[in-house]
Image (cartoon, rainbow, N blue to C red):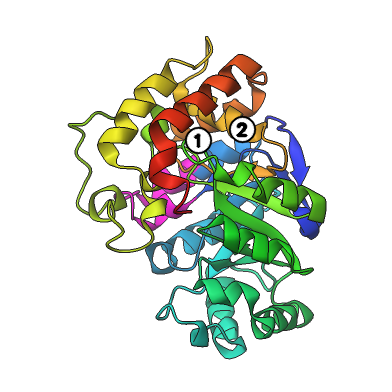
Amino acid sequence: MILMEQRTLGRTGRDVSVVGQGTWQLGGDWGEVAEDDAFGLLDAAVASGVTFFDTADVYGDGRSEQLIGRYLKNRPDADVFVATKMGRRLDQVPENYVLDNFRTWNDRSRANLGTDTLDLVQLHCPPSTVYSSDAVYDALDTLVAEQRIAAYAVSVETCAEALTAIARPGVASVQIILNPFRLKPLDEVLPAAVAAGVGIIARVPLASGLLSGRYTKETVFGPDDHRTYNRHGEAFDQGETFSGIDYATGVAAAAEFAALAPEGATPAQTALRWIIQQPGVTSVIPGARSVEQARANAAAADLPPLPQSTLDAVRELYDRSIRAEVHNRW
C-alpha cells in the first residue's frame, strides 16, 4: 500500500489523504458502473494511499453508499474515512431541513454504509437560508449527541454560502467546487476556512472531465450522464456540470490548460496538483470509472508543486476565458 500525504479535515480532527475518492459515479449519473468495477476502483484507490471516500444518500438512490459499505465490510483493514451527504431526498425547501427528517435520512445512510456512527454528514447543497438557520445546527448537534454522526459539515454551491457556514462553530468542513476553471473560492473562502480551522473538500476538480483534455466539441455523452441532461441546470445546479461553463468554451480552454501540464503528468493530474497546493485545501475528490483512473488520480499527490509560472498561466487563462461566465454566479 502506497503512503500518501495526510491533512487534518478541519474540526473532525481526523487525517485524510490529500487525494480522496469521489463516488458520485458509482450511483450511475455518469453512466453505469458495474459492481465488480466499483469494488476494483475502490480497491485501487486504497492501495494507492487514498483514505477518504465521499458519497451521498442520493447517488443512485443509495447505491453508492451501499457499494462503499459492502467494500469496507470486506476490507476491515482499510482505514477509510467516509463522508456522506443528506438533504436532497425531499423537495428543496427550508421546511424539510428538520430533525425528524435528519434522523430518517441518517438511519438510511447508516444502514447503507453498515455503521452505527457516520464519520461525517454534510448538508447536500440545501437552499441558501438553511446555512444560517439556528434550528438546523441545533438538529445537527443533536445527531452528534445521539452518536449517530461523529461530525457534520456542509456542501455548498456559492462562496457566500461557504462563508456563512464557516462562521458556525460546529461546522467541521466545507465542500465546494474548486478547480482551475473555478477560482473564486481562493479569494475569501479558503482564507476564512484556514482562519477558522475548517477543512476544505474540493469537488468537481476536473470540471466534469473537461480538464482531462480528452473531450472535443464532437464528444457525445450517454443519455443517463448528467453531462448530457444537466448542461443548463435542468436537473440540479448548473455549476455541478462542467463547473457551469458553456461546453464549447470549456473544451477550448481545456486544450490550452493541457499545454501547461509538466513532463510526465497528464492534464488531469496537473489540475489535481494545482488544487492540492492551494492553501487551505484538505482533500480533492476526483471521481473514477476504472482502476487506471483511480491510480492516476492518486498519483497526482506525488507530483512536485507546480511552479509559479504555471500558477500565473492558470490565472491568466481563467481571467481571459472563464471568469466572465462563472465568477459572479457562484
Residue 191 x/y as whole percent: 73, 46
Q: Say few, some or many: other residues with alpha carbon within 10 Å of mark 1 (under 14 / 14 to 19 / 20 or more).
A: many
Examine the image and state in which quarter residue 120 appears.
bottom right
Residue 181 x/y as whole percent: 46, 36
Q: Nearer the viewer, residue 138 or 86?
A: 138
Q: Nearer the viewer, residue 283 or 92?
A: 92
**Of pointers 2 and 1, the one earlier in the residue sequence:** 2
Residue 246 x/y as whole percent: 30, 42
What element does badge 1 sit on? helix
Q: Is residue 265 above or below residue 30?
A: above
| Quadrant assignment for the N terminus | top right
Report the magenta residues as a range. 23-41
Circle 2 sits on which residue?
A: 48
Distance, label 2 to label 1, CA atoms, is 8 Å
What element does badge 2 sit on? loop
Residue 200 x/y as whole percent: 67, 50
Q: Nearer the viewer, residue 292 or 10?
A: 10
Would residue 20 be found to the left or right of residue 144 on screen? left
Q: Amino acid at mark 1?
A: Ala
On whether residue 40 falls in the magenta region, the answer is yes
Q: Is residue 30 above or below residue 66?
A: above
On whether residue 177 falls in the magenta region, the answer is no
Q: Is residue 208 above or below residue 295?
A: below
Would residue 190 be found to the left or right of residue 233 on screen? right
Q: Nearer the viewer, residue 36 or 207?
A: 207
Q: Amino acid at mark 2?
A: Ser
* Residue drawn at (59%, 23%) of the image: 311
Q: Are marks 2 and 1 in contact (CB under 8 Å)?
A: yes
Check residue 254 in the rendering and tell me which mark sits there, or answer none.
Answer: none
Check residue 294 in the rendering and tell me which mark sits there, or answer none.
Answer: 1
Q: Is residue 307 above or below residue 2?
A: above
